[in-house]
Image (tube, rainbow, N blue to C red):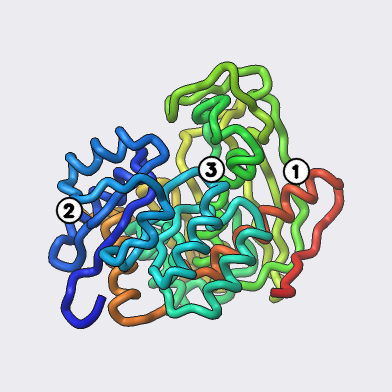
C-alpha cells in the first residue's frame, strides 16, 4: 500500500465481532477496501462476503495473511488464537488490528511486543471504549489539568445475569484465558489506565470467584450454550492495582452476581483538583468552587458517530501516517501483565509484583 491507494483489509473471523469490523470498514470505502475474509466455519465467511461485497473467501487464516492483496489484517477470533495469528501477520509485514485482549496471557503478549519492536507494522488493540464520546470528553478535561493529579480510581462492570456461551470457548480457561476479568474487565482496566494518564502498574492484589457458572446459573443471551462443554473460569473478579507513582486503581467485574446493578460499565476518577465519573452513556465532572460542590453533566452529542467508526478511522490513519496507535502494543501488554497478576494473586492469596523485564 503506497501513496493514495486504498488500504486493503483482510478479516480473520466472520462471527459477531468480525461482522462489526466488516460493517465499519465498509463504510470507509474512500480509504480502504475489504479484499478477503475467512473463518474456521467457512459458510459464515461466505455469508459475510455476500453481506459486505467482499470479493475473496479464503480457506485459512494463514492463506489470507500471505495474500499480496491484503495490507492489514483484522483478527476477531477466540483469545487463544490472537497471538499466533498476530505474530504470523507481523512476520508477513502486515498491519494488525487485534481484538481485545491482545493475548490470552502475558507470555503471549510479550511475544507480540517483541515481534512488533522489529517490525514496521502498525499493531493496534481494538479497545473501542477509548473512542466513546463521554470518555473522550473526560480525557480532554484531564489533559487540560482540570482534575489535577489523579491519585485513585475505581472502575468496574457488574453484569447481573450475563455468562456468555456457557460451555463454549468463552468459558474454557485454555481457550479464553479467563472469565469476565479478561472479557469485560480488560475494557475497564484499559480505559481507566488511559484516563489516569498511563501510570506504570507495579503490584496487584486480587481475588476471583466462580459461584454461578459451575451451577449453570447466571446465563446471559450472548452466544449459544454448549451444555456438554466446560466452565472452568471465574464469574466475578476484584482487584487493587498499585502504580509506581503511588496512585491506585480498584477493579470489579462480574458476569453474574446477586446485587442491584444496572449492568453498565463505570469509572470514578478522583483527582487533587477535581473528579470525573463515567457510567454508560453519561458522565460528570466534579469539583469545588467557593466552598460549594459543583457538578457538570456530560452526555453523548446528538448524531454522534459510533466509537467503532472512530476506532476504525484511527487504525487507517496510523497506517497512512506511520504513527503509534492510541491503543498500542505496550498498552495491550500492560493489560495482560495485570490480568495475569490478578489471577496469580487469587491463586496464591498474596500480592503479586509485575515483571517488567521485557
* Real-space CA distance between mark 1 and mark 3, rounded to the nearest whole angstrom: 16 Å
Depth check, mark 1 against mark 2: the one in front is 1
Residue 198 pos. (x, y %): 56, 71
- Is 248 displayed left or right of 119 in the figure? right
Q: Which mark is residue 80?
A: none
* Real-space CA distance between mark 1 and mark 2, rounded to the nearest whole angstrom: 41 Å
Q: Which comes sooner in the sequence, label 1 or label 2? A: 1
Residue at 54 percent of width and 47 percent of height: 79
Q: Quadrant of residue 315?
A: bottom left
Q: Which comes sooner in the sequence, label 2 or label 3? A: 3
Answer above or below: position of 103 versus 258: below
Mark 2 neighbour class, 10 Å CA radius: few under 14, some 14 to 19, many 20 or more: few
* Label 1 with label 3: CB-CB less than 8 Å: no
> How many labels were placed on the picture?
3
Residue at 80 percent of width and 64 percent of height: 353
* Quadrant including the C terminus: bottom right
Q: Which comes sooner in the sequence, label 1 or label 3? A: 3
| Residue holding disc 3 | 157
Q: Is residue 52 visible?
A: yes
Mark 1 neighbour class, 10 Å CA radius: few under 14, some 14 to 19, many 20 or more: many
Residue 274 pos. (x, y %): 51, 68
Answer above or below: position of 119 versus 355: below
Q: Secondary structure at mark 1?
A: strand
* Label 1 with label 2: CB-CB less than 8 Å: no
| Residue holding disc 1 | 207
| Residue holding disc 2 | 303
Residue at 20 percent of width and 64 percent of height: 32
Amino acid at each position: 500500500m503506497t501513496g493514495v491507494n486504498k488500504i486493503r483489509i483482510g478479516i480473520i473471523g466472520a462471527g459477531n465481532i468480525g461482522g462489526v469490523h466488516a460493517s465499519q470498514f465498509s463504510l470507509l470505502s474512500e480509504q480502504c477496501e475489504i479484499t478477503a475474509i475467512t473463518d474456521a466455519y467457512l459458510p459464515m465467511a461466505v455469508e459475510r462476503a455476500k453481506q459486505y461485497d467482499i470479493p475473496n473467501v479464503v480457506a485459512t487464516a494463514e492463506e489470507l495473511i500471505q495474500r499480496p492483496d491484503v495490507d492489514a489484517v483484522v483478527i476477531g477470533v477466540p483469545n487463544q488464537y490472537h497471538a499466533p495469528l498476530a505474530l504470523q501477520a507481523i512476520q508477513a509485514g502486515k498491519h494488525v488490528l487485534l481484538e481485545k485482549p491482545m493475548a490470552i496471557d502475558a507470555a503471549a503478549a510479550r511475544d507480540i511486543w517483541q515481534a512488533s519492536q522489529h517490525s514496521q507494522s502498525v499493531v493496534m488493540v481494538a479497545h473501542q471504549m477509548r473512542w466513546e464520546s463521554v470518555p473522550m470528553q473526560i480525557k480532554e478535561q484531564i489533559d487540560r489539568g482540570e482534575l489535577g493529579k489523579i491519585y485513585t480510581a475505581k472502575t468496574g462492570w457488574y453484569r447481573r445475569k450475563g455468562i456468555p456461551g456457557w460451555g463454549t470457548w468463552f468459558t474454557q480457561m485454555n481457550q479464553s484465558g479467563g472469565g469476565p476479568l479478561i472479557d469485560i474487565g480488560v475494557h475497564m482496566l484499559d480505559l481507566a489506565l488511559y484516563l489516569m494518564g498511563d501510570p506504570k502498574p507495579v503490584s496487584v492484589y486480587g481475588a476471583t470467584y466462580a459461584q454461578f457458572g459451575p451451577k449453570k446459573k447466571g446465563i446471559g443471551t450472548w452466544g449459544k450454550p454448549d451444555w456438554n462443554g466446560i466452565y472452568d473460569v471465574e464469574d466475578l473478579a476484584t482487584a487493587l492495582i498499585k502504580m509506581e507513582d503511588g496512585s491506585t486503581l480498584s477493579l470489579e467485574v462480574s458476569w453474574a452476581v446477586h446485587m442491584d446493578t444496572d449492568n453498565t460499565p463505570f469509572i470514578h476518577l478522583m483527582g487533587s483538583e477535581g473528579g470525573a465519573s463515567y457510567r454508560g452513556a453519561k458522565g460528570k465532572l466534579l469539583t469545588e468552587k467557593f466552598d460549594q460542590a459543583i457538578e457538570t453533566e456530560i452526555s453523548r452529542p446528538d448524531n454522534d458517530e459510533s466509537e467503532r467508526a472512530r476506532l476504525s478511522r484511527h487504525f487507517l490513519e496510523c497506517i497512512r501516517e506511520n504513527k503509534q496507535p492510541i491503543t498500542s502494543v505496550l498498552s495491550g501488554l500492560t493489560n495482560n501483565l495485570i490480568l495475569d497478576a490478578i489471577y496469580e494473586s487469587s491463586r496464591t492469596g498474596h500480592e503479586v509484583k509485575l515483571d517488567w523485564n521485557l
